[in-house]
Image: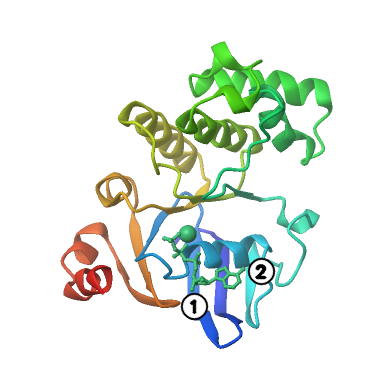
């Protein structure tokens, strides 16, 4: 097994009596891509929120590159190795595409000039070079999701958490996303990718973790998980 870049142990989160993450153990290795799937409300986004610090766990620990980050603020410098995208966007409409991307460099202590230069390079890589100076609000939903991918390239993180990157995007954009993820994964980034598009994400990942009602229902290779009748049941429930 190669180097573990992210580990969650005994993780729990409840809101009132609603146990949204109910005892999850999880390890991610460098250069590994795990698909996190499961029905609506299973707790997938909540799990990312715990890892990235938006939620504080009620129990359990989270380590990033061997460093304990449990309960630390999202912007803690100890979380620097982590990159996160959001299910509901995360771009600032009035800022240009390039300014949106450059923020990923500024929060990592890059100076403004080099962050902006690298933002333009990253936007070219995702196919948004021609609209780098447009306000993000003029871009399509799929193009705004590509802004996240330009940020991801700029951040060059040890661990990347992507929450439904392909929701509502066209096949050409999905292919750009696939190639960037594969390239960065092969260069060593560990990925957790949430997707409801099982053919797309199963074609990309080494391992699938199925979450249902806050628990790991099963995990395995895409073939193993596809053949598991409990998975079909969880999706139909
Ligand atoms: N901030 C919050 N306060 C209270 N309950 C929450 C909060 N965030 C999530 N939940 C609850 O946690 C449960 C899991 O939600 P979560 O968004 O993690 O699911 P999901 O697997 O990402 O679903 P989807 O596929 O629809 O995105 C739901 O019951 C939801 O209502
Ligand atoms: Mg979600």
Residue name at image x 51 percent, y 62 percent: 45
Sequence-first tag of 2 and 1: 1
- The residue carrying mark 1 is 24
Dot 1, how many residues are within 10 Å of its Cα: few (below 14), some (14-19), or many (20+)? some
Q: CA distance from mark 2 to mark 1?
A: 15 Å
Q: Quadrant of the C terminus?
A: bottom left
Please provide percent x and percent y for residue 127. Answer: 48, 19
Residue drawn at the location 73% of the way across and 72% of the way down = 71
Q: Is residue 179 above or below residue 188?
A: above
Which residue is depicted at the point 44% across and 39% down?
A: 181
> Measuring 61% from the left and 38% from the top, which residue is drawn there?
156
Against 32, is 17 above or below?
below
Q: Point out residue 175 in the picture as x, y percentages from the top left corner.
A: 35, 31
Per the image, label 2 sits on a secondary structure element best described as loop
- Colour mode of the rendering: rainbow
Give the side of residue 126 with respect to residue 92, left or right.
left
Lateral position of residue 179 relative to residue 235, left or right: right
Ligand 1 lies under 8 Å from the Cβ of mark 2: yes
- Residue in the foreground of this view, choosing between 234 and 74: 234
Residue 137 placement, left or right of 106: left
- Residue 199 picture location, percent across and down: 24, 47
Which residue is tagged 2? 55
């Amino acid at each position: 097994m190669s180097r573990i870049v992210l580990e969650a142990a005994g993780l729990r989160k409840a809101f009132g009596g609603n146990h949204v993450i109910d005892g999850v153990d999880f390890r991610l290795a460098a250069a590994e891509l795990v698909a996190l799937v499961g029905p609506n409300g299973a707790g997938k986004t909540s799990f990312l929120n715990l890892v990235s610090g938006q939620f504080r766990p009620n129990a359990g620990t989270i380590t990033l590159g061997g460093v304990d980050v449990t309960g630390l603020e999202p912007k803690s410098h100890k979380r620097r190795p982590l990159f996160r995208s959001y299910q509901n966007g995360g771009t600032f409409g009035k800022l240009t595409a390039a300014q949106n991307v450059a923020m990923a460099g500024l929060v990592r202590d890059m100076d403004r000039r080099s962050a902006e230069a690298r933002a333009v390079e990253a936007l070219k890589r995702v196919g948004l070079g021609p609209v780098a100076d447009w306000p993000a609000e003029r871009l399509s939903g799929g193009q705004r999701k590509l802004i996240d991918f330009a940020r991801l390239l700029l951040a060059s993180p040890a661990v990347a958490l992507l929450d439904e990157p392909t929701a509502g995007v066209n096949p050409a954009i999905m292919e750009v996303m696939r190639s960037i993820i594969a390239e960065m994964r092969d260069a060593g980034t560990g990925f957790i990718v949430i997707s409801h598009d099982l053919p797309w994400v199963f074609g990309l990942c080494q391992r699938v973790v199925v979450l249902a009602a806050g628990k790991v229902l099963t995990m395995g290779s895409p073939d193993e998980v596809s053949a598991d009748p409990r998975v079909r049941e969880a999706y139909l429930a």
